Image (cartoon, rainbow, N blue to C red):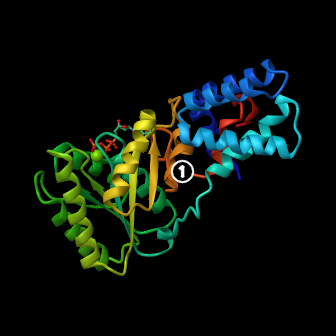
């Protein structure tokens, strides 16, 4: 229980900037308007868009809210707040936020453009799975830069898990081949593969990801394959565009949304889940090993609407 509370309060504090954009604005509207009219909805819409929920998601939320207000014959703007929270939550529901890979032999492919937090997320997740008693291995399939391999090695040491790597410039698919072979031989539960975000061009990058994917399918078809796209939360709508692009070329199982600490654009988590229907599975709220959490839409929205001083530590 104590741990859970700690997580939630860290989430609440990580979302401070996003919340300030949303809540301050929303509270002002709820206070400033004496009736629920066109202007009221327009201002609300503006705030949600400012918090990076995007036009489509915002429109859907407002329409849903309008229906609820009508149905329940609400007259006071202040009575709308809970309805708004409910509408946002409804927009975010995806079929199921599955973490089935935790309970079977699985291979996680971490993909995304450069600098979004792939390597860091591999490290954090490796550490957490290991703490949960899993046998974990990481593969340094970003061979584009020597620094990438060193960085992952540092994370593997921190997480106290095994790493499979080759030299800079070697074939990433060959690294994955080695890693899959080792993972099978050593009865590893979860193999996490870091990949390059930066290649000579986008076509190369996508081709390489496909090649890695094929190696996994061929060498270890019985393993559960999980492809996670890592997105930088501070880039707002841009992150949404990246998720769309990756989902066009690969079968995506989920999203890791990083750097939600210190951004005002945390609303993007809502937009991604609502517009793409791809579950956000983890969120990053800092650079340390335990700064990665499973994403829970209800909890996230609650955290958005909770003041820092309402959470006891
Ligand atoms: N504040 C914050 N920083 C983060 C988070 N996740 C990653 N970072 C930082 O973002 C920077 C880039 O992270 P990396 O893990 O190296 O990103 P990458 O996608 O592997 O980058 P490339 O390998 O260059 O493509 C590092 O300085 C990380 O510490 C997060 O959730 N919050
Ligand atoms: Mg990296």
On the rendered structure, is 19 left or right of 136? Answer: right
Residue 303, image x and y in percent?
Answer: 66, 39
Name the quarter showing ligand 1: top left
Residue closest to the far top: 32
On the rendered structure, is 21 left or right of 257? Answer: right
On the rendered structure, is 286 left or right of 214? Answer: right
Residue 233, image x and y in percent?
Answer: 46, 38
Image quadrant where residue 187 sits: bottom left
On the rendered structure, is 32 left or right of 243? Answer: right
| Whether residue 146 can be seen here | yes
Residue 1, image x and y in percent?
Answer: 71, 53
Residue 167, image x and y in percent?
Answer: 12, 54
**At numbered mark 1, what does the secondary structure look like: helix, strand or loop?**
helix
Q: Residue at x 61, y 25 (%)?
A: 21
- The residue closer to the viewer here, 174 or 96, is 96
* Looking at the image, residue 174 lies above or below residue 73: below
Classify mark 1: residues with Cα within 10 Å, few (<14), some (14-19) or many (20+).
many
- The residue closer to the viewer here, 139 or 30, is 30
Residue closest to the far front: 38
């Amino acid at each position: 229980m104590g741990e859970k509370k700690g997580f939630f309060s860290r989430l609440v504090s990580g979302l401070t900037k996003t919340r300030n954009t949303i809540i301050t604005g929303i509270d002002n509207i709820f206070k400033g308007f004496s009736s629920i009219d066109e202007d009221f909805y327009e201002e609300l819409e503006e705030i949600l868009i400012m918090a990076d929920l995007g036009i489509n998601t915002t429109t859907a939320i407002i329409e849903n809210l309008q229906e609820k207000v009508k149905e329940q014959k609400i007259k006071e703007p202040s009575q709308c707040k809970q309805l708004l929270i409910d509408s946002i939550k409804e927009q975010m529901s995806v079929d199921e936020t599955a973490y089935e890979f935790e309970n079977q032999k699985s291979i996680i492919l971490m993909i995304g453009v450069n600098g979004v937090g792939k390597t860091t997320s591999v490290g954090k997740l490796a550490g957490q799975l290991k703490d949960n008693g899993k046998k974990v291995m990481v593969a340094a399939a970003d061979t584009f830069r020597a620094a990438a391999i060193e960085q992952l090695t540092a994370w593997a040491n921190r997480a106290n898990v095994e790493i499979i790597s080759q030299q800079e410039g070697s074939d990433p698919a060959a690294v994955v081949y080695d890693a899959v072979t080792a993972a099978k031989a050593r009865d590893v539960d979860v193999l996490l593969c870091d990949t390059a975000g930066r290649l000579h061009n986008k076509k190369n990058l996508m081709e390489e990801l496909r090649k890695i994917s094929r190696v996994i399918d061929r060498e270890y078809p019985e393993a559960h394959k999980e492809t996670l796209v890592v997105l930088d939360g501070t880039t707002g709508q841009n992150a949404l565009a990246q998720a769309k692009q990756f989902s066009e070329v690969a079968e995506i199982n989920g999203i890791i949304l990083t750097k939600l600490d210190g951004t005002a654009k945390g609303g993007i988590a809502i937009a991604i889940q609502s517009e793409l229907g791809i579950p956000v599975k983890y969120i990053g709220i800092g650079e340390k090993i335990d700064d990665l959490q499973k994403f829970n839409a209800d909890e996230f929205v609650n955290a958005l609407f909770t003041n820092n001083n309402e959470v006891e530590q």
